[in-house]
Image (cartoon, grey):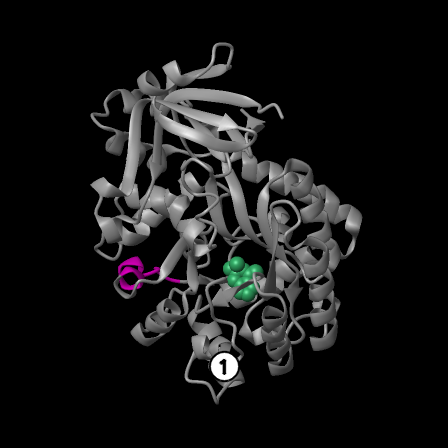
Amino acid sequence: MTVTRKAYRAAILHSIADPAEVGLEASHEYYEDGLLVVDDGRISAVGHASELLPTLDAGIPVEHYQDALITPGFIDTHIHFPQTGMIGSYGEQLLDWLNTYTFPCEKQFADKGHADQVAKIFLKELLRNGTTTALVFGSVHPESVNALFEEAERLDLRLIAGKVMMDRNAPDYLTDTAESGYAESKALIERWHGKGRLHYAVTPRFAPTSTPEQLTLAGQLLKEHPGVYMHTHLSENLKEIDWVKSLFPEQKGYLDVYDHFELLGERSVFAHGVHLCDEECQRLAETGSAVAFCPTSNLFLGSGLFNLPQAERFGVNVGLGTDVGAGTSFSLLNTLNEAYKVMQLQGARLHPYKSLYLATLGGARALRLDDRIGSLRPGNDADFVVLDYKATPLLDYRIQQSNSIEETLFVLTTLGDDRTVRETYAAGRCVHQR
Ligand code: GUN
Ligand code: ZN
């Protein structure tokens, strides 16, 4: 069998561990003049160009990028595909925002044609921003998930998604029932989970929109299909938290509702967790559950400031999420810019190596995919991005003043956005070129 081999030469930087665990220096590898060798969609080597180039057979194509940095593709651990058309909707906080803008927008996804059209726009936007893997909320309609997976399959992306389950406290046009939500999710799992690079997530919207019967059946789906994910929202907004307490008075708190229905675990991802107590962090950590930190959303909806140092103290897995359409950007670079400010407002720092970790390997760990993506380790999927130091005149000028890769990285996360992403590769194939 012939192997298709190609190599990419540029500065190369990737995370290999969490700086909170191993310190800043041991958390990454950097090659100022690096080479990434890709065989049939997988990484086969990464290192210094001077060491690797002599090992390549003559005739192997080498793409040489000037003024560029190769990093792993970004991983968005929380985003809503049916909210693409309502990003940047004015004036409301979470619960009113859902009723005023979100539900009417999601209604349109009953139409498969509409879902097909938005799936193309949505995935294109992810790739334009250098995001190669995402954990995605669909709408309540199975058609929305079929549309998204069909397009992701065509592009050979690694993607996790699920149909929303919600059987109360939402408009009639947008609710399923405990039984139909179960049956539709099950059919989608059977059709899509494990197909190519696609995975399924059981997706109860949040505790207020599911009856106890529906949450029980969500737990049953997880037991019946080991390996599928659980994806929901948690402790985002103070009114939401009060509402959960009034709907589930027997439970100790918000996280305990999900715990009661056996929805915590190594493949469970909870968006936000802005208002968690120590006991909840402890429980998230001991069950191996993950939190998606969504700073642009938390600021835009006025939800609050995620306490990353608290999560780190308890060893909670944390990934980064855009949470579009409450989030205001598809760009994880832009999201890191806001994450830094969220830390500043709490008197804490977000070091650029921690930022890189959150957007790549941390996300992969939160999704239990770090044996496949999140770093440029040989054997991993060749999902990577080429970032352009000269993307804008200001970025170019600022990077010329930089004295280290650490400083350059920080500038990329502060000034960077979709323009910074010159090329995006998924499974070794170029899927976006600016
Ligand atoms: N909580 C329940 N649904 C949603 C949603 O669509 N977006 C956000 N940010 N929070 C939610
Ligand atoms: Zn969300």
Stretch in magenta: 304-312
* SS state under label 1: helix
Residues 218 and 234: in front is 218
* Left or right: 139 in relation to 383: right
According to the picture, the residue beneath numbered tag 1 turns out to be 260
Quarter containing ligand 1? bottom right
What x and y, as percent, mark residue 394?
35, 24
Depth check: give the residue in front, 310 or 217. Answer: 217
Q: What residue occupies the far bottom of the structure in this picture? A: 250
Residue at the top extreme of this rendering:
58
Asked if the stretch drawn in magenta spans residue 305, the answer is: yes
Residue 208 is a magenta residue: no
Q: Position of residue 12 (x, y in %)?
A: 36, 28
**Residue at 22 percent of width and 43 percent of height:** 24
Q: Is residue 51 above or below residue 274?
A: above
Q: Nearer the viewer, residue 263 or 209?
A: 263
Q: Is residue 390 visible?
A: no
Residue at screen point 64% across, 63% down: 164
| Residue type for callout 1 | His
Residue that lies at the very extreme toward the front in this rendered image? 1
State the image coordinates of residue 20 (x, y, percent, origin top left): 25, 53
Which residue is at 25% across, 44% downward?
A: 351
- Please provide percent x and percent y for residue 256: 44, 79
Residue 1 position by quadrant:
top right
Q: Taking 242 as reference, is 54 left or right? A: left
Characterize the local packing of mark 1: few (<14), some (14-19) or many (20 or more) Cα atoms within 10 angstroms: some
